[in-house]
C-alpha cells in the first residue's frame, strides 16, 4: 500500500502543543482547550501563547487518545519539547487498527422523550395554576383568590343565566367593595362574538351616567372566562319591591321607568345592548340629596340565555333566535313598566311558541282595566312599546320613558287623589325606636309634582331628548276626557290682548296709600302713656335681656348645626369614620356621616341595624361597656322633632323591656351634650341582665336622639351608651359618662357637615 500520496490532517492543542489525529477527539486530554487544525504555516512546535513555555507537555500517544480522560491529568513537570509535526514518522497502521475496532451502535433520539426544562402548565381551562377551574357547581373555588392582582374575592352574591356574581375587596383602595361578575358560558371559539363582547366591555367602562352602575375593570380568569368589575351597590331592586308590595305607586313607577329609559339611551348611543333587562337588574338607591335613584346593572351579556325565569321579558325577536337590537331593550323595559303598574306581566304562556302567539296578538288586558288611577293614554303608550314588530316601537328608549312619565304624571279628570306609597322595611332597628314612615322622596316629590304637573309640558333635557315623531304619536292617540284638552295641547291661537289702564282706580289706590302712611306715621311717633302698664309681650329684647325668660313668649330661634371641630385624637384610640360602602340595607339607604375615636382595647361588632357598635368586654367575653350609633326618622331640626320624641321614647321603652329582665325610666327630656354644642332628647334608664353564671347584673343606660339641625334632612342620630355593674366605678346612671371612656367617645363624636 502506497502511503506517500496520502495527505494527513492533524489537530494540536494550542496550550501544550499535544497533537491528535483528526476525528479522534475535539478537546485536549491534558488541559481541556479546543483542538486546532495544524496548517502548513503553523508548526506544532510553535508556542500557542505567552505562557506556553511554562506548561508541561506529554508525548503523543495513540492509546491515550483513544481513551478520553474523564478527569484532568496532572504530570510531573519537565522541560517542554516542541515536536516536529510535519517531519516525524506517522504510524498509519494505527488508523487501520482503529477502523477495524468495534464501534458503538447509534441510538435513535425521539423529541418526545426529551424532558422540558420548565414545569408543565397543563390545560388551564380545567386546571388553572394553583387552583381548580371555576364551575357552576363549585363557585366557592374563587374564595380567597386575587383577581387581576387587585380584587380579593370574599363572598358569592348569586347566579343568573350566564354568570356568577362575587363580592370582592379592592386592595388598592382601602375599605372599597366591588362586584365581580364572571361569565360562565361564553363561547370563546367565536372570534367575532368575542371581539364584540370585548368592545362593549371597553365602551361600558367609559360611560359615566347617574343611572348606570359604573364598570371599573374587566379581564379574563386563568381558565379563559371573562369578567367585569363594577361598583358595589347595596339596595332594593324592583323585583324585591314587587315581591313585597305588589304593584307600585303610579308616580313612583313613572320616575323609575324614565330614569331607566335614560340609562338605556345612553348605552345605546355608545353601541351597547343590555339584552337581559329584568326587574332584578334595576336597583333602587338613595342619592346624597335623599331622592330615589335608579341604577341599571348586569350589562355586557353577549349571548341571550332564555329560560323559564326571563322569557316573559324577552322580545319576540329574541325568542325566535334573531339578533337583539335597541328595540329589544325597549320591549323589556315596557314589560317591567306594565308589571310595576299591575303586578303581572302583559304576556304569559307555557311555551315559547305560545308566548310568541300572544305577543303577535297584542295587548289584551290593559292597565286601565286593572287600576282606576291609570290614565287611558298609558294603554296606548304600552301598546306601542310592546309591538310585535321592532320597527313599530319607539325609536329611542328615552322617547318611551318620557311619554310614559308625562302620561302618568299629568293631573287628569280621572285622577282625584294622589297616592303616597310608604317605604319602610320590616327589619327596622328594634332597639333604636324606629317606626314605619313614609319614604322622604315620596312625600317631597309627590307634593311638588301634584302642584306642577297641571301646567308643565313634556320635560326634555335637550332638543334631542325627545323626538318630534314620538310627541306627535302621543298627541294623535291621546283620548280627550270630558271635552278637556291635555296640558300640552292647550295653545292660545289669538294674541294676548293688552288691558287698557284705568285712571280712576289708579287715583283711588294712590289716595288710599297716602291715608295709610299718615296713620302709620301717627302711631309710630305718638307719645307713650306712662300711666299704662305695658304687657310683657310688648317688651323689647334689646333693652330687656331677660325678655326671653318671660313665660309663654319664647324667643325665635334659628336652628343651625354647630361649626365643625378639628378633634384631636386621644391617646390609645382608633379613628372611625362612617362609610356607606360598609353598610347594608336601611343603614346604607339612610346613611349619615360622622366620625369619632374609641379605645384600642374595645371591640367593634358588625351589625346591619347600626352605624357603629363598639364594646369593652370582660375576660369572659361579657360586654361591660357599650357605645352604639344608629338613626331615627327625623324632620331635620330639634324644634320640629319635639313632637316625635314622646312616640320615639315609647317605642324605645317597649323594645328595651323585651331585652332586659328589669327596666324602668329614671328621667326623660331635653338635654345637651359636648358642653352644650348639641341639643338632644335624652332618656336615662336602669335595668338588669343575666351574667355568665346566671347572676343578675345591674345595667345603666343613656339614650340620645340628636337631630342634625338642618331642615330637610330625613334622618337623625341615636346614640346609646350602656354600662353594667362589672364596670369599675359605675354605680348609677350618672357614672357611665362621667370622666371615663364612654364620655371620651361621646366628646369626640362629630357629625359630618354636608
Image (tube, helix red, strand yellow):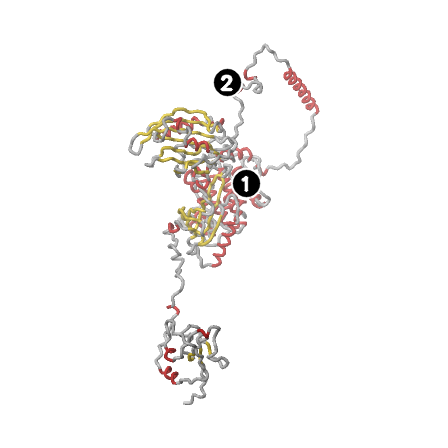
Pick the front one: 344 or 398: 398
Residue 282, how many percent across, how many down?
Answer: 46, 44
**Vertical relation: 365 (above or below) 514:** below
Residue 656 falls in image quadrant: top left
**Dot in front, 2 or 1:** 2
Q: Is residue 671 above or below residue 466?
A: above
Q: Which residue is mark 1?
A: 478
Residue 627 visible: yes
x and y percentages locating residue 718 in the rendered image: 43, 32
Question: Which residue in the rendered view is the most extreme toward the top?
Answer: 531
Element at badge 2?
A: loop
**Between 434 and 576, which is closer to the camera in this rendering?**
576
Q: Residue at x 43, y 42 (%)?
A: 239
Residue 361 visible, this orientation: no
* Rendering coords of residue 544 (x, y %): 56, 18
Circle on res. 519: none
Residues packed near mark 1 inside 10 Å, few (<14), some (14 to 19) or many (20 plus): some
Q: Quadrant of the N terminus?
A: bottom left
> Residue farthest to the left?
693
Q: Is residue 724 left or right of residue 672?
A: left
Quarter of the image where one finds residue 744: top left
> Which x, y percent locates residue 224?
43, 56
Residues packed near mark 2 inside 10 Å, few (<14), some (14 to 19) or many (20 plus): few
Identify the residue under disc 2: 551
Q: Earlier in the sequence, mark 2 or mark 1?
A: 1
- Considering only vertical position in the picture, is 191 above or below 56? above
The furthest residue to the bottom:
1
- Spatial separation of the CA atoms under disc 2 and disc 1: 62 Å
Foreground residue among 448 and 710 = 710
Q: Is label 2 in contact with label 1 (beta carbons under 8 Å)?
A: no
Observer-nearest of 597 and 557? 597
Amino acid at each position: 500500500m502506497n502511503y506517500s500520496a496520502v495527505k494527513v490532517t492533524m489537530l494540536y492543542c494550542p496550550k501544550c502543543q499535544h497533537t491528535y489525529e483528526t476525528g479522534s477527539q475535539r478537546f485536549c486530554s491534558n488541559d481541556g482547550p479546543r483542538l486546532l487544525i495544524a496548517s502548513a504555516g503553523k508548526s506544532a512546535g510553535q508556542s500557542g501563547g505567552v505562557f506556553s513555555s511554562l506548561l508541561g507537555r506529554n508525548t503523543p500517544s495513540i492509546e491515550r487518545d483513544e481513551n478520553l480522560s474523564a478527569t484532568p491529568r496532572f504530570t510531573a513537570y519537565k522541560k517542554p519539547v516542541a515536536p516536529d509535526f510535519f517531519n516525524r514518522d506517522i504510524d498509519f497502521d494505527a488508523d487501520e487498527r482503529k477502523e477495524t475496532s468495534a464501534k458503538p451502535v447509534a441510538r435513535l433520539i425521539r423529541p418526545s422523550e426529551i424532558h422540558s426544562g420548565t414545569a408543565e402548565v397543563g390545560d388551564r381551562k380545567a386546571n388553572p395554576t394553583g387552583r381548580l377551574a371555576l364551575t357552576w357547581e363549585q363557585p366557592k373555588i374563587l374564595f380567597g383568590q386575587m383577581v387581576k392582582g387587585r380584587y380579593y374575592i370574599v363572598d358569592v352574591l348569586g347566579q343568573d343565566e350566564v354568570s356568577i356574581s362575587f363580592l370582592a375587596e379592592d386592595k388598592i383602595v382601602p375599605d372599597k367593595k366591588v362586584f365581580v361578575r364572571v361569565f360562565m358560558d361564553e363561547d370563546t371559539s367565536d372570534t367575532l362574538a368575542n371581539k364584540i363582547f370585548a368592545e362593549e366591555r371597553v365602551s361600558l367602562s367609559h360611560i359615566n351616567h347617574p343611572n348606570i352602575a359604573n364598570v371599573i375593570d374587566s379581564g379574563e380568569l386563568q381558565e379563559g372566562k371573562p369578567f367585569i368589575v363594577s361598583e358595589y351597590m347595596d339596595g332594593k331592586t324592583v323585583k324585591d319591591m314587587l315581591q313585597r308590595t305588589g304593584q307600585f305607586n303610579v308616580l313612583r313607577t313613572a320616575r323609575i321607568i324614565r330614569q331607566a329609559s335614560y340609562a338605556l339611551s345612553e348605552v345605546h348611543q355608545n353601541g351597547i345592548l343590555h339584552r337581559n333587562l329584568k326587574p332584578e337588574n334595576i336597583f333602587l338607591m338613595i342619592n346624597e340629596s335623599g331622592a330615589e335613584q335608579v341604577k341599571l346593572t348586569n350589562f355586557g351579556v353577549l349571548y341571550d340565555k332564555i329560560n323559564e325565569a326571563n322569557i316573559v321579558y324577552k322580545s319576540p325577536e329574541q325568542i325566535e333566535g334573531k339578533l337583539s337590537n335597541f328595540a329589544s331593550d325597549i320591549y323589556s323595559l315596557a314589560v317591567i313598566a306594565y308589571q310595576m303598574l299591575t303586578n303581572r306581566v302583559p304576556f304569559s304562556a307555557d311555551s315559547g311558541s305560545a308566548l310568541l302567539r300572544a305577543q303577535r296578538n297584542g295587548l289584551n288586558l290593559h292597565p286601565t282595566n286593572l287600576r282606576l288611577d291609570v290614565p287611558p293614554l298609558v294603554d296606548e303608550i304600552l301598546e306601542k312599546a310592546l309591538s310585535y314588530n321592532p320597527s313599530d316601537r319607539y325609536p329611542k328608549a328615552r322617547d318611551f320613558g318620557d311619554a310614559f312619565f308625562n302620561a302618568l304624571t299629568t293631573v287628569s279628570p280621572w285622577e282625584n287623589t294622589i297616592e303616597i306609597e310608604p317605604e319602610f322595611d320590616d327589619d327596622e332597628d328594634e332597639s333604636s325606636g324606629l317606626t314605619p314612615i313614609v319614604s322622604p322622596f315620596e312625600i317631597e316629590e309627590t307634593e311638588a309634582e301634584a302642584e306642577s304637573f297641571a301646567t308643565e309640558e313634556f320635560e326634555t333635557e335637550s332638543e334631542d331628548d325627545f323626538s318630534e315623531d314620538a310627541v306627535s304619536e302621543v298627541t294623535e292617540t291621546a283620548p280627550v276626557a270630558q271635552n278637556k284638552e291635555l296640558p300640552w295641547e292647550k295653545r292660545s291661537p289669538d294674541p294676548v290682548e293688552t288691558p287698557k289702564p284705568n285712571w280712576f282706580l289708579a287715583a283711588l289706590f294712590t289716595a288710599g296709600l297716602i291715608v295709610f302712611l299718615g296713620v302709620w306715621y301717627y302711631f309710630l311717633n305718638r307719645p307713650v302713656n306712662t300711666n299704662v302698664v305695658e304687657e310683657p309681650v310688648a317688651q323689647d329684647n334689646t333693652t330687656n335681656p331677660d325678655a326671653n325668660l318671660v313665660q309663654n313668649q319664647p324667643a325665635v330661634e334659628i336652628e343651625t348645626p354647630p361649626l365643625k371641630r378639628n378633634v384631636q385624637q386621644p391617646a390609645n384610640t382608633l379613628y372611625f369614620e362612617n362609610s356607606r360602602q360598609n353598610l347594608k340595607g336601611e343603614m346604607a339607604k339612610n346613611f349619615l356621616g360622622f366620625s369619632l375615636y374609641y379605645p384600642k382595647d374595645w371591640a367593634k361588632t358588625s351589625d346591619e341595624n347600626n352605624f357603629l357598635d363598639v364594646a369593652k368586654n370582660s375576660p369572659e367575653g361579657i360586654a361591660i361597656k357599650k357605645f352604639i350609633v344608629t338613626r331615627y326618622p327625623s324632620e331635620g331640626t330639634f324644634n320640629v322633632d319635639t313632637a316625635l320624641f314622646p312616640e320615639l321614647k315609647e317605642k324605645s321603652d317597649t323594645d328595651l323591656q323585651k331585652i332586659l329582665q328589669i327596666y324602668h325610666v329614671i328621667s326623660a327630656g331635653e338635654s345637651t351634650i359636648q358642653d352644650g354644642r348639641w341639643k338632644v332628647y335624652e332618656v336615662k334608664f336602669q335595668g338588669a341582665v343575666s351574667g355568665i353564671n346566671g347572676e343578675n347584673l345591674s345595667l345603666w343606660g343613656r339614650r340620645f336622639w340628636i337631630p342634625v339641625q338642618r331642615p330637610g334632612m330625613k334622618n337623625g342620630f341615636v346614640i346609646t351608651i350602656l354600662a353594667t355593674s362589672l364596670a369599675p366605678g359605675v354605680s348609677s346612671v350618672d357614672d357611665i359618662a362621667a370622666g371615663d371612656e364612654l364620655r371620651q367617645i361621646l366628646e369626640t363624636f362629630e357629625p359630618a357637615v354636608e
